[in-house]
Amino acid sequence: MHTEKKTIEQDLNTPYFMIDESKLIVNLEQCKQLKRLSGAKLVLALKCFSTWGTFETIKPYLDGTTSSGPYEVKLGHENFGGETHAYSVGYSKADIEAVKPLADKIIFNSLSQLDTHYSNCVDSASLGLRINPERSVAGQDLADPARPYSRLGVKQENLDLSVLDKVEGFMFHMNCENKDADAFIAILDYISATFSDYLDKLKWLSLGGGIFFTYPGYPIEKLALALKTFSEKYAIQLYLEPGEAIITRTADLVVSVIDIVENVKKTAIVDSATEAHRLDTLIYKEPACVLEAAENGQFPYVIGSCSCLAGDQFCETQFEQPLQIGQKLHLIDSAGYTMVKLNWFNGLKMPSIYFKRLDNTIELLAEFSYQDYKNSLGNH
Ligand SMILES: Cc1ncc(COP(=O)(O)O)c(C=O)c1O
């Protein structure tokens, strides 16, 4: 039985994503522990991972979803359930009409958005406002919500207590892959010191995503204690909005070597592209890791993409043996901000998405055709 299933995996055509349910459950068990110890609720940030074929596995562990745009709200409401939080940097009137019947909480990014939509929404959902605490832990300026001139959230100097006539909750999001519990707790203490007048009266507070509590060695108990103490102090329901923490290290992007070219360095060209299938590798200049690579391997390669963009490469790494054309490579940790950002640049073949279940069976969650490409460019 085992051999038959393995054969199926080997036979799959690249490129494809392979999400591993057993690895997902390892992260989800940590979510469960954090919830139990802290009393905080956890909502999945769909912007990071929306592959809804896996939601049956994730649902029992989390409280719902949070979103960044109207389609994510709909997906979360229809396919995940639980609490549906709707946040957007900017809602049009039409967006609000779409979101209103689906969302339990609607969170506005600015006071002007709150004023514009307040009377239309107040009877449909618990309303919230995003606050910019002007503190953050984010490695890169591009992903730093507290960067100079940030458009994300209202600064304390522009707030007054009258906002509490309109909102029941605040949302702060100021971390990006923050592995340092003390650094998070320092911001939490700052929020407590700066916003206590508001916190005393609010019903709920979301502390956003970017807290990397599933990173190996992260002190979950310490984080949980800080959250519990905070929520008891203000008698407030806390939420976290994890994305990456939930699906980190759960999926590979599997590609094949198509060609090997040499220009001082050897480049193995694979049947995928960062620009189309793993965009953050390009945007954040964070090289991918290849499962088959060996730290002290004698055969170095650039793992190059098959897009036309000159600088489009996954990484530079080395192997114990020369790479062969047709060989599969696994680009590990490829779940977050990948499938949600896939695009059709260069008319490349879109990766299929597979889910390896606990019993090792492999479920096809998505495959894409020429017609999908064509439809993305015109369907009338
Ligand atoms: C408002 C908000 N919540 C949650 C998240 C999820 O963050 P992460 O995937 O780093 O946990 C983000 C990411 O940008 C965000 O902007």
Image (tube, rainbow, N blue to C red):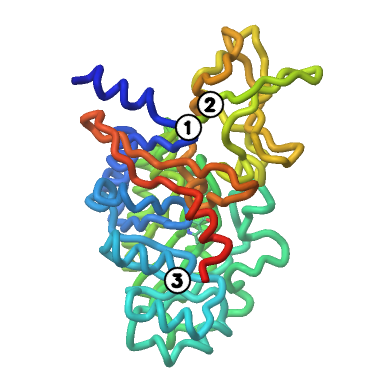
Residue 79 in picture, x, y percent from top left:
29, 60
Q: Which label's residue is closer to the chain start, 3 or 2?
A: 3
Q: Amino acid at mark 2?
A: Ser
Residue in the image at 26% along x and 24% along y = 5
Distance (Cα) linking label 3 and label 1: 32 Å
- State the residue lying farthest toward the bottom: 119
Q: Is residue 88 above or below residue 165?
A: above
The residue wearing badge 2 is: 256
Asked whether residue 220 appears in the rendered view, the answer is yes
| Badge 1 residue CB within 8 Å of ligand 1 | no
Q: Amino acid at mark 1?
A: Thr
Q: Nearer the viewer, residue 53 or 335?
A: 53
Q: Is residue 360 above or below residue 150?
A: above
Whether the residues at callouts 3 and 2 have beta carbons within 8 Å, the answer is: no
Q: Nearer the viewer, mark 3 or mark 1?
A: 1
| Crowd rating for badge 1 (residues with CA inside 10 Å; few <14, some 14–19, many 20+) | many
Whether the residues at callouts 1 and 2 have beta carbons within 8 Å, the answer is: yes
The residue wearing badge 1 is: 14
Q: Nearer the viewer, mark 3 or mark 2?
A: 2
Residue in the image at 53% along x and 52% along y = 341
- State the residue lying farthest toward the right: 264
Residue 118 in picture, x, y percent from top left:
45, 88
Q: Nearer the viewer, residue 299 or 155?
A: 299
Horizontal placement of 185 versus 74: left or right? right
| Crowd rating for badge 2 (residues with CA inside 10 Å; few <14, some 14–19, many 20+) | many
The residue wearing badge 3 is: 70
